Image: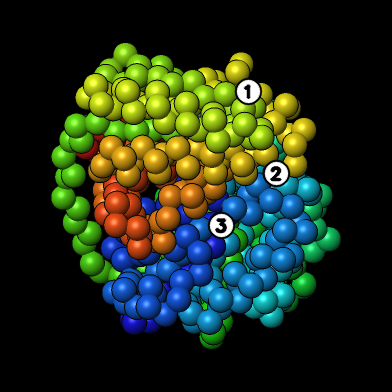
């Protein structure tokens, strides 16, 4: 295997494919594993210079992290990549009890025996920006401070009520926090300022990014302070975009990526556990353009009658597919139909919801010999794909105009799943015609 530039753990599946897409577009061959691979599986991807491990920590408790992240980070450390990245969502939504980024940093810092952890959240490619420690994000071509964002400030599980990321993190960890702000980053003293924060005991150093220019400077600093044996860093896929700028500048990476169009699929199946208004618009658009809709009751899907609910959904999806039409099976149609409060009365129900959607998608894929499918919802995707027998993913077609949601190829020991093209879409990702574009094989 070539020397690895980067290894990473994604805190959910769509975030993990976001990183893979960024790296592939930058000329870095990448594979994403669904679980820690054995040597036989790992050896199939010796051409790769980046290796990812898809996780679910965004929707997990600190106690879960204590049990699972330490082992995952330990395995990634054995890969001896120059950089090991704990990937979080670019909206940074998290809390002390769910998806605690602070706790994840504590664990990674311990595993890598590292005093100071660089943190980059801004990613202009995703319309996410940090300025003097505050996070801003776009929504329908308008820009909002994250605590005033129409969606993320009202997230059903981890609403963002604070835009100052250092204050937000201080609720999740007692580690000391430092900031390389925009003014400092763009000054001649940026390296000295970064080093001073480390020397003065800042356990976490947030680096502002508000443009491609400051992104490149952040990448230069992260690469400069790397240590032998691998450096642990945290952030969005802004980490990859920043490093790719540095790798291109210092000629570490020079390959030009090339991807052939996949062509149209005659019919596809979509499962969605997303309550996002973005996904709602995508579903409504799809229903006007060749898709049939099947509403799946989320409460039934997590109840003792889940087998019957799945069987009914499969039967409905089968009828649509056998009629030659694509189908979208959804548990919610926008925020107004969110039944999260009911779901959360049952411990672990959200994970059950994702697994149920994965089970019905697997059944339809195998039975109907589908060649292309979509899973919508960041938390949903992680648990749904786990039910489908997928071992690893590679990129089939990046979607640079809709970043973070590439069309992937599934690698599996299940013959009917191996080679399946699958797109994994976070709630806030994609244009209104995303589902239709994936069906038609268009790079939107």
What colour scheme governs how the chains and residues are painted in the rendered image of this protein? rainbow
Crowd band around label 1 with a 10 angstrom C-alpha radius: few (<14), some (14–19), many (20+): some
Q: Nearer the viewer, residue 165 or 72?
A: 72
Q: Where is residue 81 in the image (x, y as percent from the top left)?
A: 47, 77
Give the structural element (helix, strand or loop) at label 1. loop
Numbered-mark total: 3
Task: Name the N-terminal-most of marks 3 and 1.
Answer: 3
Q: Nearer the viewer, residue 383 or 167?
A: 383
Report, in whole angstroms, how far the alpha carbon at label 3 lies from the one at label 1: 24 Å
The residue identified by callout 3 is 55
Q: Position of residue 95 (x, y in %)?
A: 74, 45
The residue identified by callout 2 is 348
Q: In this view, does 268 lie to the left or right of 229?
A: left
Q: Is residue 393 above or below residue 292?
A: below
Residue at the image position 74 percent from the left and 52 percent from the top: 61
Give the structural element (helix, strand or loop) at label 2. loop
Crowd band around label 2 with a 10 angstrom C-alpha radius: few (<14), some (14–19), many (20+): few
The residue identified by callout 1 is 338
Q: In this view, does 26 lie to the left or right of 103?
A: left
């Amino acid at each position: 295997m070539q020397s690895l530039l980067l290894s990473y753990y994604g805190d959910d599946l769509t975030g993990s494919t976001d990183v893979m897409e960024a790296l592939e577009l930058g000329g870095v061959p990448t594979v994403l594993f669904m679980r820690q691979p054995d040597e036989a599986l790992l050896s199939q991807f010796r051409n790769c210079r980046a290796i990812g491990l898809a996780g679910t920590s965004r929707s997990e408790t600190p106690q879960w992290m204590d049990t699972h992240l330490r082992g995952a980070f330990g395995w990634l450390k054995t890969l001896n990549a120059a950089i090991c990245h704990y990937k979080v969502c670019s909206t940074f939504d998290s809390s002390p009890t769910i998806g605690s980024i602070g706790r994840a940093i504590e664990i990674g810092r311990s595993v890598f025996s590292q005093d100071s952890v660089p943190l980059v959240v801004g990613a202009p490619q995703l319309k996410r920006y940090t300025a003097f420690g505050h996070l801003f994000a776009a929504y329908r071509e308008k820009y909002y401070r994250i605590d005033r964002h129409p969606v993320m400030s009202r997230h059903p599980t981890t609403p963002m009520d604070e835009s100052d990321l250092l204050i937000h993190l201080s609720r999740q960890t007692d580690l000391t926090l430092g900031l390389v702000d925009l003014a400092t980053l763009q000054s001649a003293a940026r390296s000295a300022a970064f080093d001073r924060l480390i020397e003065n005991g800042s356990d976490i150093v947030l680096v502002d990014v508000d443009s491609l220019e400051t992104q490149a400077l952040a990448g230069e600093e992260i690469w400069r302070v790397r240590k032998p044996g691998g450096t642990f860093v945290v952030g969005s896929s802004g980490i990859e975009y920043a490093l790719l700028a540095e790798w291109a500048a210092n000629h570490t990476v020079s390959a030009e990526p090339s991807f052939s169009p996949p062509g149209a699929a005659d019919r596809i199946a979509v499962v969605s556990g997303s309550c996002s208004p973005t996904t709602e618009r995508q579903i409504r658009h799809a229903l006007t353009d060749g898709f049939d809709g099947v509403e799946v009751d989320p409460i039934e899907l997590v109840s003792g009658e889940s087998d019957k609910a799945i069987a009914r959904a499969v039967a409905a999806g089968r009828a649509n597919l056998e009629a030659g039409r694509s189908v979208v099976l959804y548990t919610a149609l926008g925020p107004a139909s969110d039944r999260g409060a009911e779901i959360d009365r049952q411990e672990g129900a959200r994970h059950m919801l994702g697994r149920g959607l994965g089970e019905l998608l697997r059944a339809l894929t195998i039975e109907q010999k589908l060649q292309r499918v979509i899973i919508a919802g960041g938390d949903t995707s992680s648990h749904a794909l786990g039910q489908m027998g997928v071992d690893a993913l590679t990129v089939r077609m990046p979607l640079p105009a809709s970043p973070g949601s590439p069309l992937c190829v599934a690698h599996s020991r299940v013959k009917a799943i191996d080679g399946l093209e699958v797109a994994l879409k976070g709630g806030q990702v994609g244009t209104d015609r995303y589902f239709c574009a994936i069906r038609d094989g268009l790079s939107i």
